[in-house]
Image (cartoon, grey):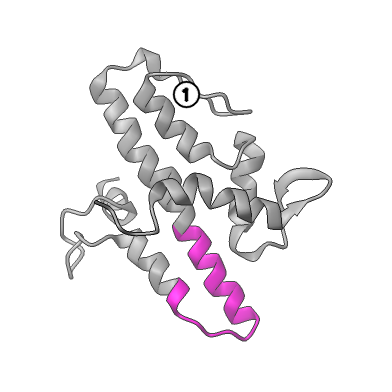
Amino acid sequence: DNTSTLTILLWTTEMDAPLLASLLAPERKCWTAQAAPTKTLNFFYDYYGRDDYAHQFVEAAFDGATTSFANGNADFSQYGFEGRRQAIELGTVYLSIFMYVIRQFEDAVDGCNEGRYDTHAWDEGVCFYTGSLEGRDGAGSGKLLHQLADNR
């Protein structure tokens, strides 16, 4: 059983709803530019037209369905198991975990700009960028952004 309160699903769906409620600009359903930890998410929202784009992408890959974004739709019905597996794996890392990492980095930078020198947010961003399998010298068999960048 997963007893953690943090999950990738939480980052890409449930966490967005309360944040949206507290950060929405009244004139448009979008993250406000002033919402420090979510500045980058605003660009993704503008492109995809929804805040849960990462979750929707991965779910469509699981279902072999088509996404319904404002831009950048993907039709997974044309892919077999291996293609969909790759979309699920890479979509989870490149879309979901990437945004969480960026959110932590933005929070840390904004904290410094406000006189809060809390390194926890930065450290957490680095941890989720690197993952636990990377190894001390970066030559491990990681699965997160660091290893995927090495592979490219």
Q: Is residue 113 magenta?
A: yes
- Residue at position x 66%, y 40% from top? 46
Residue under circle 1? 74
Indicate left or right for 85 with 97 as reference. Answer: left
Q: Position of residue 129 (x, y in %)?
A: 36, 60
27 lies above or below 80: below
Element marked by disc 1: loop
Front-most of residues 112 and 139? 112
28 lies above or below 115: above
Location of residue 49 by image quarter: top right
Q: What residue type is labelled 1?
A: Ala
Location of residue 36 by image quarter: bottom right
**Label 1 neighbour load within 10 Å: few <14, some 14-19, many 20+:** some
Indicate left or right for 2 with 137 as reference. Answer: right
- Residue at position x 63%, y 47% from top? 43
Q: Position of residue 136 (x, y in %)?
A: 18, 70
Quadrant for the C terminus, please.
top left
Front-most of residues 85 and 12? 12
- Residue at position x 30%, y 61% from top? 130
Instruction: Determine the main secondary structure of the stretch shown in magenta.
Output: helix
Magenta part of the protein: which range? 101-121
